[in-house]
Image (spheres, rainbow, N blue to C red):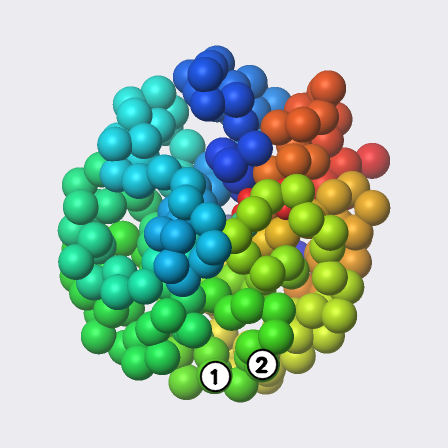
Amino acid sequence: MTNPVLIAPSLLSADFSRLDEDIRRVEEAGADLLHLDIMDGHFVPNLSYGIPVVEAVRRVTDLKLDTHLMIDNPLEFLEPFRDAGADSLTLHLEACPQPAPLIEEIHRLGMECGLAVNPDTPVAGLLPFVADLDLVLIMSVQPGFGGQEFRPEVLPKLVALSTWMAEHDHHTALEIDGGVTADNASHCRGAGARLLVAGSSVFGAPDAAAAIAALRGDE
Ligand code: DX5
Ligand code: ZN
């Protein structure tokens, strides 16, 4: 049996003046997790939000908080994010070229751990860590902003990684993030993605339930 595809709306595209309401809306529409984009204005050329927002989100939902750290030097923030209620932390290989001790620390703190690569970073650098990871995130846009165009040239990276994982009997979840819409979701699923992050195509849709169903590939 194939694993189900899970949909993680990215909060970056929510209405921050009505966060509680907007989270409930996507939760009722069938979101499986919530994707939280943390940006430091240094690793990426944008700032988003930090620990107090994660804490506030934790208070209004039981959805798993899939936390994407687009920050340099994440070590000192791992525990504060855990205390704020994050369920998983995803590091960037470009920010953490020696991620092993961080992966260990995230697990020691009781969270799941992911490792992400930017569109131009080959997947080879991820391979030594896959066995120790809960998820691998392939960026399909340059990180930093929501609402960008999906880059289809990253799909072969997903195929290569899922093939390699099957050959090595690894069951790490493959996540894709950036510009995912109903138009390209079937390509993402076909290439092996099991977690689809979608900001604008879910929060920006008039009918979030229909948008999530379309991403999932429901008939
Ligand atoms: C980009 C973020 C994404 C983004 C996705 O740096 O990592 O999670 O919010 O938003 P959309 O789906 O609008 O590209
Ligand atoms: Zn993200």
Judge whether residue 81 can be spotted in this image: yes
Residue 197 in percent (x, y) is at 58, 46
Nearer-the-camera pick, 135 or 21:
21
Residue at 62% in and 69% down: 119
The residue tagged 1 is: 125
Residue 138 left/right relative to 206: left
Q: Residues within 10 Å of mark 2 (few under 14, many from 20)?
A: few
Q: Residues within 10 Å of mark 1 (few under 14, many from 20)?
A: few
Looking at numbered disc 1 in the image, what kind of residue is underneath it? Gly
Residue 64 in percent (x, y) is at 39, 39
The residue tagged 2 is: 122
Residue 160 left/right relative to 129: right
Label 2 residue SS: loop
In the displayed structure, would residue 5 be above or below residue 192? Answer: above
Residue at 24% in and 69% down: 102
In the displayed structure, would residue 48 be above or below residue 71? Answer: above
Residue at 32% in and 31% down: 53
In the displayed structure, would residue 137 be above or below residue 6? Answer: below
Q: Are circles 2 and 1 on residues that touch, CB within 8 Å?
A: yes
Residue 145 in percent (x, y) is at 56, 47
Quadrant that contains the C terminus:
top right
- Quarter location, residue 90: bottom left
Quadrant that contains the N terminus:
bottom right
Asked whether mark 1 and ligand 1 are closer than 8 Å, the reply comes as no
Residue at 73% in and 55% down: 150
- Quarter location, residue 194: bottom right
Label 1 residue SS: helix
Looking at numbered disc 2 in the image, what kind of residue is underneath it? Pro
Q: CA distance from mark 2 to mark 1?
A: 7 Å
Residue 206 in percent (x, y) is at 73, 19
Judge whether residue 194 can be spotted in this image: no
